Image (spheres, rainbow, N blue to C red):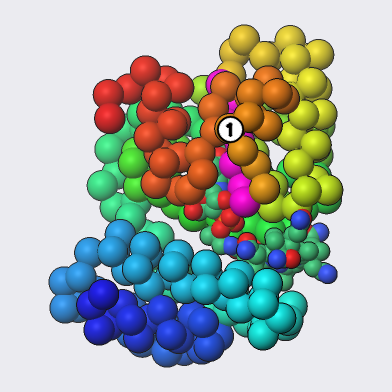
């Protein structure tokens, strides 16, 4: 891994937002592509934070501080990743489902989709089925994306899909789901059209759902 990416990675793991910002600016000035910084510096660091939490070395406050450091980095990378502002190739309404406050993965997916040319309507976290429905009515997206990080909130994806079907919109949108506990089998069981295990594969999947060449 590039030295600067390694420094960004360590700064995220250590929750040092100021250093993340400083090193990302330096990396960009040296011509390191934003996507490399995102993958090697930010995404892999959050995986390490998850591992440290699971092993009992990190607790919720440390996790939160690292998550904020990562978001400071994402704020710098976002405009660069979406820079190639061509006509959107599709519209995506996305949100983290009801009861779930995790948004780092959902934000990454949104950012990668934006970078790939999709227009994103981000409903945020703790999104009720009703809120998904009114966004569909207002924005007419081709894709509805749902994220869940908790085993206790995964089932809210199913109830959202049911609400969309009951309102008569099921054949008007493709539904894509993801998040750490979500699997392809689960996605199929709840009647989603697509599933992706990470942000870059979410781009491939979104394009596949719309029949766009990858
Ligand atoms: Co929480 N948390 N958390 N947490 N947290 C997990 C998820 C957990 C696995 C940690 C653990 O115990 N090992 C565990 C869930 C256990 C379970 O359900 N079985 C857990 C818990 C228990 C909790 C609380 C209940 C803790 C507590 O309060 N006691 C609480 C719940 C709050 C709530 O939601 N109601 C809680 C709170 C928090 C923080 C607020 C401290 C913070 C979130 C900050 C934020 O999001 N703004 C946090 C964090 C940071 C984590 C971990 C460490 C990291 C999550 C993350 O950001 N990963 C996580 C541990 C882990 O995942 N190993 C954990 C990095 C991110 C890039 O990955 O989100 O998986 P991920 O997204 C990926 C893919 O999943 C995929 O692409 C993304 C990018 O590659 N993807 C999609 C995601 N959405 C997609 C949608 C798509 C397609 C792909 O299509 C639409």
Name the side, left or right, on which 121 lies relative to 209: right
Q: Is residue 7 visible?
A: yes
Taking the spot 44% from the left edge, 31% from the top edge, the residue there is: 206
Whether the magenta-drawn stretch holds residue 13 is answered as no
Q: Count neighbours of disc 1 (C-alpha within 10 A) and say few if under 14, some if 14 to 19, many if 20 or more.
A: some
Ligand 1 visible in quadrant = bottom right
Dominant SS type (magenta): strand
- The x and y percentages for residue 17 are 50, 84
4 or 135: nearer the viewer: 4
89 or 202: nearer the viewer: 202
- The x and y percentages for residue 112 are 41, 49
Q: Is residue 140 visible?
A: no
Taking the spot 32% from the left edge, 22% from the top edge, the residue there is: 212
- The x and y percentages for residue 61 are 72, 83
Quick check: 47 above or below 16?
A: above
- Image quarter where the N terminus lies is bottom left
Mark 1: is the Cβ under 8 angstroms from ligand 1?
no
110 or 203: nearer the viewer: 203
Outermost residue to the front: 55
Name the side, left or right, on which 86 lies relative to 197: left
51 or 117: nearer the viewer: 51
Whether the magenta-drawn stretch holds residue 177 is answered as yes
What span is in magenta? 174-180
Taking the spot 59% from the left edge, 72% from the top edge, the residue there is: 51
- Tell me the element at label 1: helix
- Image quarter where the C terminus lies is top left
How many marks the image carries: the answer is 1
Quick check: 41 above or below 4?
A: above
Q: Which residue is mark 1?
A: 184
- The x and y percentages for residue 69 are 53, 79
């Amino acid at each position: 891994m590039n030295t600067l990416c390694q420094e960004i990675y360590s700064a995220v793991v250590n929750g040092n937002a100021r250093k993340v910002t400083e090193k990302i600016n330096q990396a960009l000035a040296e011509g390191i592509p934003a996507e490399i910084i995102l993958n090697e510096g930010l995404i892999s660091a959050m995986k390490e934070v998850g591992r440290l939490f699971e092993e009992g070395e990190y607790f919720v406050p440390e996790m939160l501080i690292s998550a904020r450091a990562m978001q400071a980095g994402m704020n710098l990378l976002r405009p660069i990743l979406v820079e190639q502002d061509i006509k959107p190739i599709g519209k995506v309404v996305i949100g983290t489902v009801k009861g779930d406050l995790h948004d780092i993965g959902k934000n990454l997916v949104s950012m990668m989709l934006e970078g790939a040319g999709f227009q994103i309507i981000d409903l945020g976290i703790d999104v009720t089925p009703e809120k998904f429905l009114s966004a569909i009515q207002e924005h007419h997206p081709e894709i509805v994306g749902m994220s869940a990080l908790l085993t206790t909130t995964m089932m809210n994806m199913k109830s959202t899909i049911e609400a969309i079907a009951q309102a008569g919109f099921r054949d008007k949108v493709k539904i894509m789901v993801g998040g750490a506990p979500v699997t392809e089998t689960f996605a199929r069981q709840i009647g989603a059209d697509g599933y992706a295990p990470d942000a870059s594969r979410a781009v491939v999947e979104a394009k596949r759902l719309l029949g766009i060449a990858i």
